[in-house]
Image: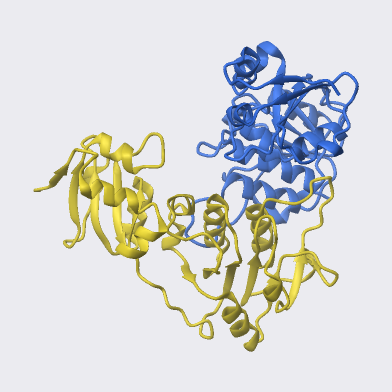
Chain colours: A blue, B yellow
Amino acid sequence: MIMKEITSVSNQQVKDWKKLATKKARQKENRYLLDGWHLVKEALKAKQPITKILVTPTFKHIDELELPTETELISISEQVAKQLSETKTPQGIFAEVKITQTNIDPTKVSGAWLFLDGVQDPGNIGTMVRTSDAAGFKGVVFGKNTADMYQPKVVRSMQGSQFHIDLVSADLLTWVDAFKAQAKPVFGSELNEAARSYDQVGRHQDFALIMGNEGNGMDPELLNKTSLNLYIPIKGHAESLNVAVAAGILMFQLID
Amino acid sequence: MIMKEITSVSNQQVKDWKKLATKKARQKENRYLLDGWHLVKEALKAKQPITKILVTPTFKHIDELELPTETELISISEQVAKQLSETKTPQGIFAEVKITQTNIDPTKVSGAWLFLDGVQDPGNIGTMVRTSDAAGFKGVVFGKNTADMYQPKVVRSMQGSQFHIDLVSADLLTWVDAFKAQAKPVFGSELNEAARSYDQVGRHQDFALIMGNEGNGMDPELLNKTSLNLYIPIKGHAESLNVAVAAGILMFQLID
C-alpha cells in the first residue's frame, strides 16, 4: 500500500485541514473532518463520501480498515494528528468527508422529527442528535441560528448518530407548515398559558418536537405556529432543565 | 465601604485562589471558589459560609449585593478576574466559600436520591445535580471515583442546584445497604439479564437510582446489590444514551 506521507505541521495540506474547523472553510471546500476511530468506522459503514483517511504510524486498528477504492490513505505524524485534533490524546485517525446537501421534502416524510431552533451549544446539539437516534426519531432539522452540524464539537458529540438518521439544514417555518398541513402535531417546548404537561398528550408516530435556544427559548413566530406547547413540571428549585436533558425526557415520552 | 484592592495577577492571594481549582488545594485550604453572579446570588440566598466576595470595578449588580457582616468584600482588577475564571468573559464576581462536610445518616433520610458511581465528566455530573433538583430529588450521593463536587466545572454546571438539595460524598455500598435495610428500592441502570424496562416499574417516593461510569457502567459489587436494574430501550442505532440524558429520563419517570 503506497501512501503519501505528511509529517510537518507547516505543510499546506495540514493548514487546510485545520481550517475545516471553521464554517467558512467548510463551505468553501465542501469538506469536513472526522476525528477518531468510532466516527470513522461509522462513516465507512454508512458509505459516506470519504475522500481521504489520515492515520498515524501508531494507529491501532489499521488492519480493520477497509477502504473504498476512491479513498486516499495518507500517513501523518503524531504532531500533525495533535495539530488537527480538538482532543488531548488523538486516536490517530481522521477522515476527510465531502459535504453532501440533504434535500428532504417535508411534505413527504414520516415518523418523529426533532427541530432545533437557535440551539447554540455544540455539546447539547450533538447529544440531542444522539438521543433522537436512540429514541427512534427519523431525523433532526437544524433551523437558522442553530450551530452548524459540521462543527467539530457537534460532530464529535453526535457519536456516529449523524450516519443513522437524517440531518437537514432548513427553514423551520417551512417544515412546521408542512407538518401542520398534514395534520401532524408540532410540539413546542416553552411554557406559556396554554402549555400542557408533557405526560398528558399521549404518544405519537408522526410528529415534530421543537427545542429552542438555551437562554431565550423559541423564536416567537415559530412558537405561534405550534399545535401545542409542552412543559416539564419542575418540582424543586432549579430554574430550568438543560436543553438536552429536557429533549431526552420529551422524546422518550412522546414517541410511540 | 472600605475594600481591600488586588490588582496584580502575581499577588500571592490570587495564586492561592487560582490553586483552588485543584482538589489538593481545596482539601488543604478547606475553601472553594464560586464564579458568576447567579451562583454567588444563590449561595448568599442559601446562607452558605462565604468568607470573601471579589468584584471587579465594572461588576453590574453591586447594588443588589447584600453581604453578611463576616464576609470580606475585595476589589479585584479585570486581569485578576480573567486569571481566576474558567470562562472566557468572566462576570466580575467570585465568592470564596468554606467547605463544610455534610454528614447525613443514610438510615434517616427520606425521598428520592441519586447515587453517582464513578461518573467522571464534570458537565454530566453538574447537569445530573441540576436535574435531580428539578425532578424533586432530596439529594445526590457522590461515590468514590466520582469527580469532586467542588471542581470548578462541576460547580458551574450545577447552576445553583447544589444549594437546593443535599450533596454528600460517601461510600455508596453503605448507602445502598441502608436503603435496602428499610426496604426502599435501589435501582441500578445497567442492562443485564434481569433488567426491566424503566417504564414498567411504577413510581416511587422513597428510592435510590444509581448512575454508573460513562464508559464502564456500574461497579459490579454495587450492581450486585441493587433491587432491580433498569434499562431504557434503544430503538435506533445509537449504542447508548449520554449518562445525564439517561438519568433525566429515569428520574422523571421514577419519582412519584
Judge by depth and name the residue closer to the eye, B178 or B217: B217
Quadrant location of the C terminus of chain B?
A: bottom right
**Residue A182: image x %, image y %?**
84, 31
Residue B97: quarter of image: bottom left
Whether residue A54 sits left or right of residue B49 in the image: it is: right
Residue A173: quarter of image: top right
Judge by depth and name the residue closer to the eye, B115 or B223: B223
Total marks shown come to 0
**Residue A106: image x %, image y %?**
81, 26
Asked if residue B176 is positioned above or below residue A235 in the image, the reply reads: below
**Residue B66: image x %, image y %?**
22, 54
Residue that appears at 85% across and 26% down:
A107
Asked if residue B189 is positioned above or below residue A151 in the image, the reply reads: below
Asked if one can make out residue A185 in the rendered structure from this viewpoint, the answer is no
Judge by depth and name the residue closer to the eye, A3 or A143: A3
Whether residue A255 sits left or right of residue A32 in the image: it is: right
Residue that appears at 75% across and 38% down:
A37
Residue that appears at 54% across and 85% down:
B107
Give the residue furthest to the bottom. Answer: B181
Residue A147: quarter of image: top right
**Residue A217: image x %, image y %?**
55, 37
Asked if one can make out residue B197 in the rendered structure from this viewpoint, the answer is yes
Asked if residue B244 is positioned above or below residue A183 in the image, the reply reads: below
Asked if residue B108 is positioned above or below residue B233 in the image, the reply reads: below
Whether residue B68 sits left or right of residue A140 in the image: it is: left
Judge by depth and name the residue closer to the eye, A70 or A127: A70
Give the residue furthest to the right. Answer: A69
Give the residue furthest to the left. Answer: B2
